[in-house]
């Protein structure tokens, strides 16, 4: 949703989405900021061409892409996966991360208290990945993954291999 601002046309301040996060989360996937399609739908990775739900669905063995959004989010939480973004608000004309300006970073300090089992944070792309050192200082494992965006032209199979290597060890670990 765009908030009014006194800046020029196309410079509206945008507010991101609430996190998909609860006490069961062991792995958090952080993107940069929702695309215009995601903001309009009020859904993470709401653009039909984004590979996110296909990637995570392949790893979990679930048809996430075909499910209604509330079912998708329930299934990832059941498997200990949270979803959020590094920016809570920004100015960004269009959908490219390179155009993000005046970004306000989300407050990550309380993550461990909210999800005591949180072990790893995976960053969806290089823009989000710039925040890996900040989360590593909180004692979390971090990794930067190839972007799930269709604008990042790495073949799907190559993206999937990297995502699988990062997510499977945490998602499929037994919970005591």
Image (tube, helix red, strand yellow):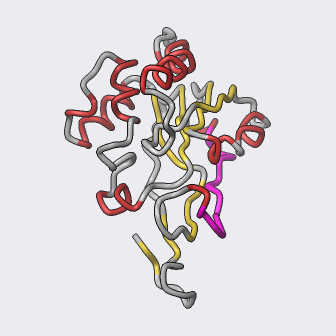
Residue 54: quarter of image: top left
Residue 124: quarter of image: top right
Quadrant occupied by the N terminus: bottom left
In percent of width and height, residue 92 lies at: 54, 68
Q: Is residue 34 left or right of residue 140?
A: left
> Quick check: is 55 in the magenta stretch?
no
Q: Is residue 50 left or right of residue 96?
A: left
Q: Is residue 66 left or right of residue 122?
A: left
In percent of width and height, residue 174 lies at: 49, 9
Q: From the viewer's perspective, is residue 28 above or below residue 99?
A: above
- At a point 43% along the width and 74% down the height, the residue shown is 2
- State the count of labels: 0
- At a point 64% along the width and 47% down the height, the residue shown is 127
In percent of width and height, residue 73 lies at: 33, 38
The magenta region covers: 99-111
In percent of width and height, residue 104 lies at: 64, 64
> Quick check: is 101 in the magenta stretch?
yes
Please state which of residues 171 and 65 is positioned toward the viewer in this rendering.
65
Q: From the viewer's perspective, is residue 148 above or below residue 171?
A: below
Please state which of residues 139 and 58 is positioned toward the viewer in this rendering.
58
Q: From the viewer's perspective, is residue 162 above or below residue 4?
A: above
- At a point 50% along the width and 21% down the height, the residue shown is 158
- At a point 69% along the width and 46% down the height, the residue shown is 109
Please state which of residues 8 and 22 is positioned toward the viewer in this rendering.
8
């Amino acid at each position: 949703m765009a908030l009014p601002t006194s800046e020029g046309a196309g410079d509206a301040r945008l507010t991101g989405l609430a996190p998909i996060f609860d006490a069961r989360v062991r792995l958090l996937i952080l993107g940069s900021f929702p695309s215009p399609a995601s903001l309009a739908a009020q859904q993470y990775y709401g653009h039909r061409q984004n590979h996110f739900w296909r990637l995570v669905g392949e790893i979990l063995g679930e048809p996430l892409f075909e499910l209604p959004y509330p079912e998708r989010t329930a299934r990832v939480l059941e498997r200990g996966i949270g979803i959020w973004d590094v920016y809570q608000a920004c100015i960004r004309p269009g959908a490219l991360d390179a155009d993000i300006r005046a970004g306000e970073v989300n407050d990550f300090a309380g993550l461990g208290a909210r999800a005591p089992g949180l072990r790893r944070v995976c960053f969806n792309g290089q823009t989000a990945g710039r925040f890996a050192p900040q989360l590593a200082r909180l004692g979390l494992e971090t990794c930067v993954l190839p972007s799930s965006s269709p604008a990042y032209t790495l073949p799907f199979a190559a993206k999937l291999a990297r995502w699988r290597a990062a997510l499977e060890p945490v998602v499929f670990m037994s919970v005591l």
